[in-house]
Amino acid sequence: MTPAPSHSAIEQYHDLLAGGLADDSQAWLDENIERRGLTFGGRPVCTVLRPRWMTPSEYELCRDRAAIVLRAFSTAHRAALADESVRAQLRLTDWEEQLATVDPGFAAASPTSRLDAFFVDGGKGLRFTEYNAETPAGAAYNDALTEVFEAMPVMREFQRTHHLRPLPARSGVLRSLLGAYEEWSGARARPRIAILDWKEVPTYSEFLLFERYFAGQGLECKIVDPREVEYRGGKLWSDGFEISLIYKRVLLHELIERCGIDGPVVRAVRDRAVCMVNPFSCKLMHKKASLAVLSDERNARLFSAEEAEAIEAHIPWTRVVEERHTMFGGKEVDLPKFIRAHRERLVLKPNDEYGGKGIVLGWEATDAEWEAGLAAANEEPYIVQDRITLPTEAYPSVIAGDLKIFDRMLDTAPFAVDGAYVEGCMTRLGTAALLNVTAGGGSNVPTYVIEPR
């Protein structure tokens, strides 16, 4: 396997910054962040001056192994729909149970999705810790940042000696949307797209990027708040705009909480009056308990030999927090006792939250914080997951006029098309173990495959 991007390449890039290109590059980044509206809740989505680099072999590992893991999720999804005992492991709510079996009119449970992963063992291994199967964000941010970095002064100079291949993502999102719509409609007619979410969400700036991108592809598109639609005459409308395809960015639990299970969007989708991507059934694998379904020994019968091997290699040990015995490291353990005794190697996560909310890192938590997490897990579904060692790389920033270079942890987030194969990859950086831009820290950076010229 080719080693990770060499220290010499990173050092060369940082030397170019230190040699006089840092200020101009930072000015370019700041100007384009503002001009293009690349903000998340008012904060810049990127705060560093170097993109993420992957070697060809690292990208191949991510792409090829993700495809098998995605097949395993599809297997688990089919099993959950067919078998109530499997579905019960996902801890669905009553309304999720009602909507999970609604036929979306196309085969893929999550036409557009994103895995969250970390390289381990010096780039030789990979662990997938979450599957965003409902409303994956970041594809348009990724592509816009790629365009910004392409023209950055330090990047233009660096590419004299290195070839950098970008990994665009938004074209895959569009292909997923159009493929699902064609399957749903039985025709190649061009849909009228509504990007559906609340006006006040911090990702609104990405909706604007997608709106412009869709328009550039010759598609009619409008950003729509779910509170401002009506279902009449067998059609879904927004202020005179007839919607035929929903690019759903609103979280389903928020949609149901605010608009009800009999709201216009839900009724229109159930009546097959509008195509919605991702559909209701995406919630099954979006639940963090889906990783428990994959890694739990009681479900081994569900998976092919290839899927089982990939699960063993790439999915951290994960269980729903409950009173039971299970296997860990080849030995049977009492799960509640094991969780209390080994918190330094475990993380607790709510079954259906985002932005890092409710996550408790055992190795950072106090005894009281860990007990509070366990108490929360008695009130609502939680998973417990084995800790992985987070990879780090040095990244540069200009802070108060000075170039600063320090290590940051990095999360690899490949986008999936049709829930089946990888196209595009986002990287998130952070200085805390909880790598999440939504949680208020960190930075997104574009990802490239690097090779010397």
Image: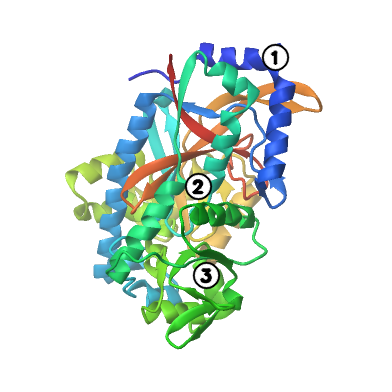
Coordinates of residue 368 in the picture (x, y in percent):
65, 51
Q: Which residue is mark 1?
A: 18
Q: Which residue is mark 2?
A: 139
The furthest residue to the bottom: 233
Coordinates of residue 212 in the picture (x, y in percent):
56, 54
The residue closer to the viewer here, 123 or 226, is 226
Give me the C-alpha separation between circle 3 and circle 1. 48 Å
Which disc number belongs to residue 253? 3
Give me the C-alpha separation between circle 2 and circle 3. 22 Å
Q: Is residue 114 above or below residue 198?
A: above
Q: Is residue 145 left or right of residue 81?
A: right
Coordinates of residue 19 in the picture (x, y in percent):
69, 11
Q: Residue at x 33, y 54 (%)?
A: 418
Pointer 3: residues within 10 angstroms few (<14), some, or many (20+)? some
N-term-proximal mark, 1 vs 2: 1
The residue closer to the viewer here, 438 or 245, is 245
Q: Is residue 424 above or below residue 377?
A: above
Q: Is residue 376 above or below residue 23?
A: below
Q: Can residue 386 be seen?
A: yes
- Front position among marks 2 and 3: 2
Q: Secondary structure at mark 2?
A: helix
Q: Residue at x 31, y 60 (%)?
A: 108
Q: Amino acid at mark 2?
A: Ala
Q: Quadrant of the N terminus?
A: top left
Q: Secondary structure at mark 3?
A: helix
